[in-house]
Amino acid sequence: MSKRFKSYLTQFEMKEKGKAVSSEEVEKDASAFFDNLLEPRKLQGERMIVGADSVLMFAPFSNGKQGISGHLFITNFKISFVTADKSSYPDGDNNQAPQRNKLLNNTDIPLTCVEAIYQVSSGDKRRRLLPGMNITTQTKYLEIHCKDFQIHSFGFKFTIKENAQKITDAIVRFSYPGKENLLFAFEFGHNSHLDEKPPPEFLEQGDWERELERLQCQSFWRVCNVNYGFHISDCLPEYFVIPSSLQNNDINKAAAQFVDNRIPTWSYTYCVNGASLVKMSQLQPESDFKNLEDKMLSAVKESSGNEKDLFVLDLSRHCPSLADVRTSHEKFRAFIMTDSAKDFYSSDSRWYSNLENSQWLQQVSSCLNVSNLVVNQMIRESVTVVLKEEYCCDMSCLVSSLVQLQLDPEYRTQEGFQSLVQREWVVMGHPFQKRLNLIWNANSETEQAPIFLLFLDCVWQLLQQFPSSFAFTETYLTSLWDTVHVGIFDTFLFNNVRHRRQFLQNGRRLTLLSLPSVWDWKFHLSDEQQLLFKNPLYMLRNSYDLDKVVESAKGALRHSGEKLRENCYRLLLGSSPPSTYMFALQDTVLRPEVTASLIKVWTQCYLRWIIPAQIVGGGNPSQYMQQCILAEEVICLRHKLQTLMDEAHGTQQTLGDESRRARGSRPNSGLLFGSTGYQTTSKHLSSVYITSSFPFSPGVSQHTQHSLICGPLSRYLKDTAIDPLDEAQDDD
């Protein structure tokens, strides 16, 4: 028991015995004790840097007129706001702050997620704070702009000046670390004790060999170990795939002539016709060994299995450059990220012109257009395509991944997509640390560019045009983008495999660091949250033969003498389309449209924090909710139909009691809004509380939409029980 708490108890006992202790003193000591408990929840290796009390956290779009008072803390991992006013939280009844996930509360900001810091001083002078800047003026407000497009505003009107100064200095200092050992991942890796988990894919030779076998191309391509110990290239993994005719000696001779020693490496083979996809960097500017490039490409052509010439595509001429993506993204953020109603409506009045000027959708369209070009070459012409880029680590990763998503349904599952990202981006050396600006240096701004976000946006466009072709949802894509900025997952923390190994081995301390993989979703998300990743349309399309189900139901109705509804309305409706029309397997190959009218803004990711832009009870989340309910109903009806058919044929009589119970129980849909999903309370979630930014932003409060500081996913997950189907019917 702490001395302060003992003192509080002693004074309380003295007061009970009638001794002279004022109620003000007791209340003061009690308040001091409980205020001392207001500290953020910390992870292993997380330590407090500085804190300040009486800080105001303003509600979004309240113009600084609404918010809550509390304590603001800076740790070596996050900026954390904690308040004693639990009624301010959506889960106030539980007397605890709602959690965004297992690692962060809703009022926590990872330091690696901070994009920009703005100081508002006396006279409402606003300036951006940069590393090394001398901060002498008193801070009136702080605006923290995050990489996930969220804005947090803090006021220091009632805070001690010295504490406000310390908070400002600490946020600037720890949000822009100059060395990677200053990242929180360094301390977390030393102190965490993670359960044993399988290593990330494609770091071992067997991972590549299994992929070659799956695509039936192991006779033309082979896994080489010429880069074992990173002898050839720091940017390539120790194992990668090359043409079978190339010898290790050939690679040793040619590697130095390519930028970053990135020789032509295999990415994918379309097993229908043997056309392959290969990536390579450009020759060094001073290289006089053009014949070495020709020899490498001749080997690639030989592995194609035909005599057709290679299609070499120079991505620098067809895709946006790093500077283009960076500039476009900055303009895009500038008019999207608003925190006041005045700024929102001003920006909204010029929405289309601002969107056009940013060129962001044009960048998305350009990337999809290039991937269509590559797909057409591989499908129609049966030609092997070589993607050529200066450093072969940005647009080549993006285009290669899109092509494989369009060609191979395997990569449209969650597991397949994660494997694709691991192989094409993480293992093959996309420089996440540089592109995400995790370490601040003189070249930070020129090397920064959200290439991975551009890729996820392209995938979202595919998902919109082919809604039943992907096993995952847009919520999965948005959550994946958010995990990029948490800063403790080794998946998106490094520039290449060698960089990762050097960081984790930490030779100076002779210890091994242990960091989680982002693909271990259970580490940071609950089972309920992961249910939001499942696409009900994909489930219906791939798990059920809907035509067969409908025809079986019609047969049962005809046998019972019931009149079919479609016959009653045939004259009005005409002939009914096949039940699987909307799920038709047009092609296993996806060919998206890239015209301006079909390339849209990814609203869930970019506009989820903009309260005035939210559609209450509408948008994609509302459609998703209805799709889950319909999918659940299809599953239940199919189960009932099968049960009735078994009973009609006497199958049930031959089964034992346990088998009958197993067949009689309704299958679990695995969908969040299914009637057999998680029902932790008796409450029912009304669609009016779902907004177009679900599940990241708050629903509309009964009192005011500004009363909630942030979007508690846990609030929705507690109340997601949809009115269940009649259980009595399920037991028929």
Image (tube, rainbow, N blue to C red):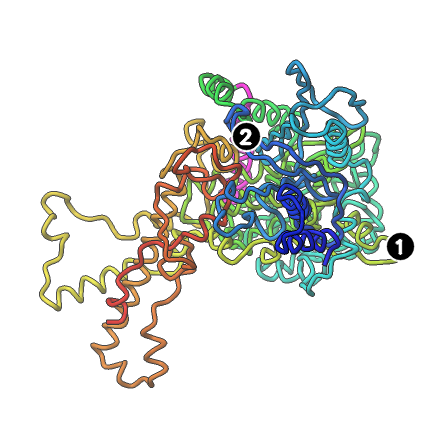
Could you tell me what secondary structure mostly forms the magenta stretch? helix
Provide residue 513's location: percent of width, then percent of height: 79, 56
Give the label, 2 or 1, closer to the camera.
Answer: 1
The residues bearing labels 2 and 1 have C-alpha atoms spaced at a distance of: 47 Å
In the image, taking residue 289 as reference, residue 652 lies left or right, namely left
Instruction: Give the residue at x 18% y 62%.
Output: 554
25 or 118: nearer the viewer: 25
Provide residue 588's location: percent of width, then percent of height: 44, 50
Provide residue 132's location: percent of width, then percent of height: 81, 26
- The numbered disc on residue 509 is 1
Span shown in magenta? 357-381
95 or 511: nearer the viewer: 95
Dot 1: what SS? loop
**Mark 1 is on which residue type?**
Arg
Instruction: Give the residue at x 73% y 51%.
Output: 4
The residue wearing badge 2 is: 366
Asked if residue 451 is positioned above or below residue 545 in the image, the reply reads above
